[in-house]
Amino acid sequence: MSDEGDAATPTPGGRNGFAVTVRGLTRSFGQFIAVDSISFSVGRGEIFGFLGANGAGKTTTIRMLCGLLAPTAGSGTVAGFDIMRAYESIKLRVGYMSQKFSLYDDLTVRENIEFYGGMYGLRRREIAERSGALFETIGLAEHADKLAGSLPVGWKQRMSLAAALLHDPDIVFLDEPTSGVDPVSRRSFWLLIYELAARGKTLFVTTHYMDEAEYCSRISIMKLGKIAEIENPHELKRRYGVSTMQEVFLKAVGGEEE
Amino acid sequence: MMHRSLRRRPTAGPDTPQETDALPGTARAAEPIAVRALSKSYGKIEAVRGVSFTVDRGKIFGLIGPDGGGKTTIMRTIVSLLTFDSGEVLFEGFPVERSSPYVRSHIGYMPQRFSLYQDLTVEENLRFFGDLFGVAQNEMTRRIEELYEFSSLAPFRGRRAGALSGGMKQKLALSCMLVHQPEVVVLDEPTFGVDPVSRSEFWKILKALSSRGTTILVSTAYMDEALLCDQVSLVYRGRLLATDTPQRLRGQFVGTLYLAPTDAPHRAYAALAESGLCRDCYLFGDGVHLTLEEGKTPGAVEHHLAASKVETSGLRAIQPGLEELFLQLMKE
């Protein structure tokens, strides 16, 4: 029995169908309160935009939600597991697609994914089965045996998404998923994200680029460790009386640093 | 020898390239940067294919496009860090490949991964780059104060560069590059990974520089920054798809653009993409942006969406942005 005890028993589908629900989530580093008692819930199948200025507490929050950092205070669940105690279980239920995903350029797409699956402790057969299906969904099948280094940016992005999805997580964190990708590939990537959401995956998108935020069903904007706004993009634009999320962000966060 | 103190304008003198068989009057060329029919391959990969553009004095010129399009290659040839296969690259009228010391001392170049010394303070970094460019000590303090005014970095002068936020690092990198007061600056994706507030502050600095007469060539992957430039080129697969002022570029979009607003843009897109109703059909966060196929009406699109069980509040004409233009030009 792990020291996580009962906390490691998930509530099927998360409580009340929430993928994430936290109350009073706090993390301090010494005197500095990086995340200051935030509360929010994200439903299953949501595409949730997670925005904020550099240093607003986004990364700290995400590290807690991924089970990589213990909260100082608060309560809640991620994928049905207790955020205060069950981080080992949480880690297995979340995927993370980094903007700076490290691909081995001299391995093929398939080999990269196998390597990644190995790190998650998946068996060879599991990896083969899942990556086959995943390559179909993501549209990577025809490129599976090409060297990663030879692929254009848009395909590397997809490969990085495939790696994040291989262990079949409930929640996937996407860090600026389409930055630097051409406008056509960006759109096929977003169609893919909608498709994943329709299949019940919950997607957290962090980005500094507000046109990307427009695609999210709901947005939160963090400021100085707190959540300044949490709402759908349409409503935010209406409330601030502006036409772009860029303007919403500038007004919500204001021009202060540190 | 270090470069001598840098003058505001290049004039004929020991600094100017002697070996150049300069055309008469080229020392005061009309444009600081002129690129003509530039091509550059890496092995079989044609990174830049016949690119031509000029950057006017005191203007902000943007190279806009996705990664891998050739933006960095173009910039590196201009600052004479990279040779090219064919074409012409002139800086102040001088061919860059034969004027490399002159080019490098007169252009401020900020590469994508600008190296700040993480364990030096803000001020130490500025002084280091000043020394590197041969800025006289008595000049240095005055210039650094001026740069603080620009960048609002003064309160952080004693902070180690490694402890700065992403936005402030970029401002410091820019300041380091400006210590020797170059008249022309080349910035390769300076706002990459920087939050919207810091990006907007960074652009205010660029605007202020430009209003003082500095010529700026800047690259970015994001269209919203294009609107802040005086002139932009859309760069894709080694070519320039279009070059003009951002306002005039929007006018290059062919057809009337409509928005089909919906909360389910992916479903609207799926319904419309193969419907035969749209000539252009693009997914956006607020719905589908489209132009109509010849003879089709907005009503037909609305009807089709309704039949496909996609809720929409009705088509309305909208102004095309650079993103839609880019998408349209990519199809050609």
Image (spheres, coloured by chain):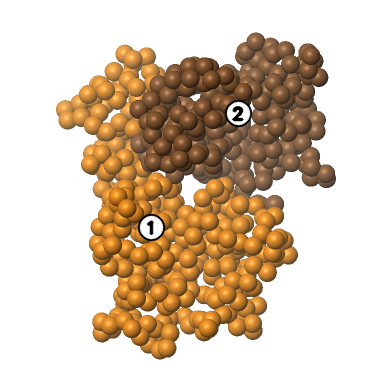
The color chain A is rendered in: brown
Horizontal side, residue A82 vs residue B210: left or right: right
Residue position marked by numbered label 2 in the rendering: A119
Judge the density around disc 2: few (<14), some (14-19), many (≥20) Cα neighbours within 10 Å.
Answer: few
Q: Given the image, on which type of amino acid does mark 2 rest?
A: Met
**Quarter of the image where one finds residue B314:** top left
In the depicted structure, whether residue B175 falls above or below residue A10: below
Apparent side of residue A246 relative to residue B305 in the rendered image (left or right)? right
Whether residue B52 is situated above or below residue A113 in the rendered picture: below
Same chain for labels 2 and 1? Say yes or no: no
Instruction: Name the side, left or right, on which B269 lies relative to A102.
Output: left
Q: Identify the residue at horizontal 31%, vertical 13% (top origin).
A: B307
Furthest residue to the top?
A12
Q: Which chain is orange?
A: B
- Identify the residue at the far bottom of this view: B13
Return the mark for residue B42. none
Question: Residue pushed farthest right?
Answer: A31
- Residue type at numbered disc 1: Thr
Question: Which residue shows up at 28% across the image and 82% down it?
Answer: B22
How far separated are the C-alphas under marks 2 and 1?
37 Å
Rendering coords of residue A222 (x, y %):
65, 38
SS type, badge 2: helix
The answer for which chain carries disc 1 is B
Q: Looking at the image, which residue is at 40% across and 29% down?
A: A144
Mark 1 — residue? B73
Quadrant location of residue B267? top left
Q: Residue at x 73, y 65 (%)?
A: B158
Q: Position of residue B42 (x, y in %)?
A: 34, 54
The quarter of the displayed image where residue B124 is located: bottom right
